[in-house]
Amino acid sequence: MVGSEERRQLLDDGYCVVEGVLSREMLDRLRAATDALLAQQDPERLRRARATGSMIPVVAPDPVFADLIAWPATLAALGGLGYLRPSFSDGWIISKPPKSPRLFWHYDWFSWEDARSYEPEPMQLFAMFYLVDTRVENGALRVIPGSHVRHNPIHDLLAEPHSRELTEARNTDAVEFATLPDEVSLPVRAGDLVLGDARLLHAAHANESDERRTLITLWYQPDLASLPERIQAQLAAKIQQPPDDWPRGAREKVQRLLARYEGSSAPYGRSLYRPRPAATV
Ligand SMILES: O=C(O)CCC(=O)C(=O)O
């Protein structure tokens, strides 16, 4: 049961782990579906995205991904954290090839000009499902606890959190790939759920193993309607629509959860930099 301890950790540290969320059968279905997609990847494109690995939208042909997006145990975990009407915007199949370098430090939040971005309640959460057990040697997640709300020296040094230079790992001596004094490794079992605040600084270890390390990251908004309208507009603008050829039940399952904004405010542009808060300058 997810409850007050996980909520405290999510608010204080910016993440929490819920063990054993996916069933063995679901893991097998997801491995088969992701292996089929990865087999069709352009090897040159994958070679270029050395640090991240594949970035395949989760609204892929196999409707197993609808089951994942609306997975009851995930929604129950969000409910246990107090998020009773979450929405879903997008998701990505991220497979780190064997012998690939570290993933760079970054956050996935882009509305830094809004004062709401400095409050403790998360506005968007990642839900990460690794399809293999992870450990330092095969690309486990790394996080900086508290960096979702507290300024960290690395914030001042990140050049541009999602640049092509970083994705292609052109210079792994850059600070974005560094080992940091306050980082924590988060090895998990296949099928565990890692929930994290989109503002949290995170990265991954290199995959030094001979096997790919596949992860599915889904993005949920705990309570979209409570956010400033320009943030709502920004988050709703990135939704992935379920494919037309999914069975109707699968499409409806996802459509019920899709983030929607029907107001007239303009979405924020994608601001990549987290400015240093005035009080700490
Ligand atoms: O590859 C990983 O372990 C982390 C992926 C990630 O940073 C993300 O999905 O935002």
Image (cartoon, helix red, strand yellow):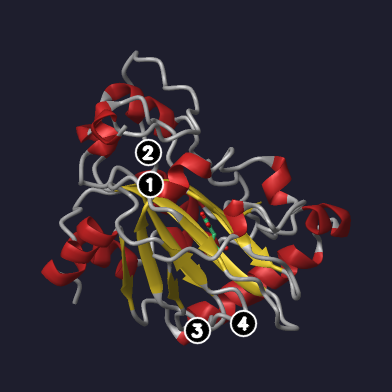
x and y percentages locating residue 219 in the rendered image:
43, 50
Q: Residues within 10 Å of mark 2 (few under 14, many from 20)?
A: many
Q: Amino acid at mark 1?
A: Arg
Task: Name the residue that disc number 2 marks.
Answer: 259
Q: Which residue is mark 3?
A: 25
In front of the other: 171 or 142: 171
Q: Is residue 122 visible?
A: yes
Q: Is mark 1 within 8 Å of ligand 1?
A: no
Mark 2, mark 4: which one is toward the viewer? 4
Q: Position of residue 116 (x, y in %)?
A: 24, 32
Work out whether mark 4 precedes mark 1 in sequence or the reverse, and give the earlier one.
4
Amino acid tagged 4: Glu
Disc 1 from disc 2: Cα separation: 19 Å
Residue at which label 4 appears: 137
Q: Amino acid at mark 2?
A: Ala
Q: Earlier in the sequence, mark 2 or mark 4?
A: 4
